[in-house]
Amino acid sequence: MGEQPWPAVPFANREVKDALSKKYGVRGIPTMVRLDGANGELADTNCRARIQIAQDGEALLAKWSGVPTVKVQGTSQNKGACCAVM
């Protein structure tokens, strides 16, 4: 992928990357944690494993956000407050 369609820390900004890694316990790549969108608090540290074993990814995203996933022209858009750090 040439460009990321989501906000990201520039690769060269190692200080911010290191601070985020320390704050969220990132020890390797890929790591995915879930934050509470309302307050930024850590909600789950094992999202990668949960996604890998999920039989229905859209249902999992809906569960995480607390609202149903909405289908829009063949894509899914989640209307809830959910943030992942990878």
Image (tube, helix red, strand yellow):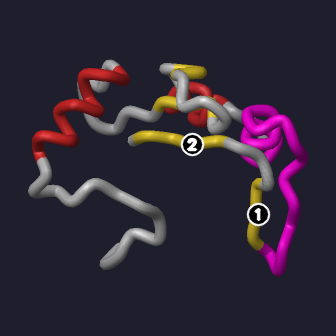
Query: Mark 1 highlights which residue?
Result: 76
> Is the C-beta separation of discs 1 and 2 under 8 Å?
no
Would you place residue 4 above or below residue 68 in this image?
A: below
Q: Estimate the spatial distance between the alpha carbons at disc 1 and disc 2, rounded to whole Å.
A: 15 Å
Query: Mark 2 highlights which residue?
Result: 83
Residue drawn at the location 47% of the way across and 71% of the way down: 5
Residue drawn at the location 87% of the way across and 43% of the way down: 67
Foreground: 16 or 63? 16
Residue 15 appears at what percent x and percent y?
12, 40
CA neighbours of label 2 inside 10 A, class few (<14), some (14 to 19), many (20+): some
**Nearest to viewer (mark 1 / mark 2):** 2
Can you tell which quarter of the image residue 41 is in?
top right
User: Does the magenta run of residues contain 64?
Assistant: yes
62 sits to left or right of 12:
right
Q: Amino acid at mark 2?
A: Cys
Can you tell which quarter of the image residue 56 is in?
top right
**Which stretch appears magenta?**
57-74
Quadrant placement of the N terminus: bottom left
